[in-house]
Image (cartoon, helix red, strand yellow):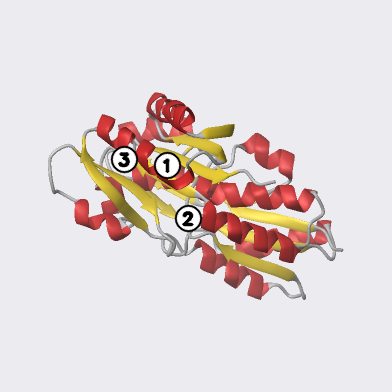
Amino acid sequence: MSKVRIVTDSTSDIPPEMRDQLGIDLVPLKVIFGEETYLDGITLSPEQFYEKLQRAQSLPTTSQPSPIEFMETYARILNEDPGASIISIHLSAKFSGTFQSAMIGQSMLERDADISVYDSKSATYGIGLLVVHAAKLAQAGKSKAEILDEIEQLNQDKKLYFIVDTLEYLQKGGRIGKASAVIGSILNIKPILSIDNEGEVTAIDKVRGQKKAVARILELVERDFGRDPVELTIAWTNVKDLALELGRLVQEKLDVRAVHHTWIGPVIGAHVGPGAAAIFINRVRG
């Protein structure tokens, strides 16, 4: 059985130490402040990004990796592990051309290669969950077909909810998706957002004030998982305290067997803005 290598992009927001431990290959997106271009999470850390965002006179922009960058990554892996299979898991095609770049990069290889490019239909650790699970399965010796089947099941089962301080960033970046209906409705409205099965941002509910938003998320996760054992990942922009408090309250409601923490990185942060907190939950299997 050939070895399976896992590739993702930087919007998966997997902590670097976890990525290194699991042997996950990364292709970074870019963040542009004026004339300066940075590699997401590599030459610009999340902490540095949110500091720059506070001082910036205009919103940063982002750009996807080129097909050549994907081609070179795949070629390097195949040189390191001749005969390896590759699963390349990426940001929702509804948000970015990253998935398409990966597909084109695959087609540019001048050799036969067993590569599957997978649209996560998600963002930040909604991708990370799939990538980490795939990498663990690869380390356990599972086949490419088995891994693809398991991550598809996980993708259908997982839930994510996030709250933002303002919809301005999503709106200006063109990533507002189906949440546009809540723009400018009532002062201090806090939409509870998710990403639907088509990979678009969608508003689950809208409430007045942050405390009510947190309370509503707790109702939603209890409805979703009941007393099933779950794994929880908590993610934040520059509001770690809010995210940790949300995570603590979730742990009071659910049977949480493992908790992970991560930043919402620069590229996704550029589109959700400061003040965003998110939770990602999946059932523990086996």
- Look at the numbered disc 2 and give the secondary structure of its residue: loop
Label 2 to label 3: alpha-carbon separation: 17 Å
Secondary structure under tag 1 reads helix
Label 1, label 2: how far apart the Cα atoms are: 18 Å
Q: Is 25 placed left or right of 275 in the picture?
A: right
User: 74 left or right of 231?
Assistant: right
Which sits in the foreground, 50 or 2? Answer: 2
The residue that appears at 24% across and 56% down in the rendered structure is 180
Residue 285 coordinates in the image, percent (x, y): 65, 46
Q: Earlier in the sequence, mark 2 or mark 3?
A: 2
Q: Earlier in the sequence, mark 1 or mark 2?
A: 2
Q: Which residue is mark 3?
A: 164
Residue 262 in sight here? no
Is residue 147 shown above or below 256? below
> Dot 2: within a 10 Å radius of its alpha carbon, few (fewer than 14), some, or many (20 or more) residues?
many
Amino acid found under the numbered disc labelled 1 = Val
